[in-house]
Image: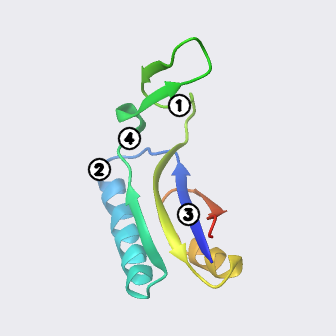
Amino acid sequence: MKYMLIFAGEHEGGEEKMAEVMAGVDTWWGKYSHSGAIVGGERLQPPSRATTVRLGGAAPTIVDGPFAETKESIGGFAIVDVPDLDAALEMVKSWPGSPAVEIRPVWED
């Protein structure tokens, strides 16, 4: 079963802290990539680089910046192919990065 892991949280701290976190993320990512569990994913640029398109009015409105005002933002995502939700939960329990990970099933035909 495929799941999308959405990594979210506050991205605060200095360069030293970020380097430490990213080293842990690289190790975690490598472990699950080599096992074949991670089948895709990317790290995202910060929310300040986002563009939001708001629909529903007479014409779309294009806004620079993130979708919502929040302290947490999505830092990246992974697509994993694991036997079940329990396996995805086990992966996430060892995630060294952001403090929140959403696990969402992917529609499969």
Does the CB distance between marks 3 and 1 fall below 8 Å? Answer: no
Residue sitting at x 55%, y 57%: 6
The percent position of residue 61, horizontal first and vertical second, equals: 49, 17
For marks 1 and 4 on the same chain, the one whose residue lies earlier in the sequence: 4
**Residue position marked by numbered label 2 in the rendering:** 15
Is 20 positioned to the left or the right of 91 in the image? Answer: left
**Residue position marked by numbered label 1 in the rendering:** 67
40 or 32, which is in the foreground? 40
Q: CA distance from mark 3 to mark 2?
A: 25 Å
Residue sitting at x 29%, y 50%: 15
Q: CA distance from mark 1 to mark 4?
A: 12 Å
Does the CB distance between marks 1 and 4 fall below 8 Å? Answer: no
**What amino acid type is highlighted by mark number 4?**
Pro
The label number, if any, that marks residue 5 in the structure image: 3
Q: Is residue 55 above or below residue 2?
A: above
**Secondary structure under the numbered disc 1 in the rendered image:** loop
Q: CA distance from mark 4 to mark 2?
A: 15 Å
Residue sitting at x 62%, y 20%: 56
On the rendered image, what quadrant is the C terminus found in? bottom right
**Secondary structure under the numbered disc 4 in the rendered image:** loop
The percent position of residue 24, horizontal first and vertical second, equals: 39, 70
Q: Residues within 10 Å of mark 1 (few under 14, many from 20)?
A: some
Q: CA distance from mark 2 to mark 1?
A: 26 Å
The label number, if any, that marks residue 47 in the structure image: none
Q: CA distance from mark 3 to mark 1?
A: 19 Å
**Residue position marked by numbered label 4 in the rendering:** 46
Q: Residues within 10 Å of mark 2 (few under 14, many from 20)?
A: few
On the rendered image, what quadrant is the N terminus found in? bottom right
Does the CB distance between marks 4 and 2 fall below 8 Å? Answer: no
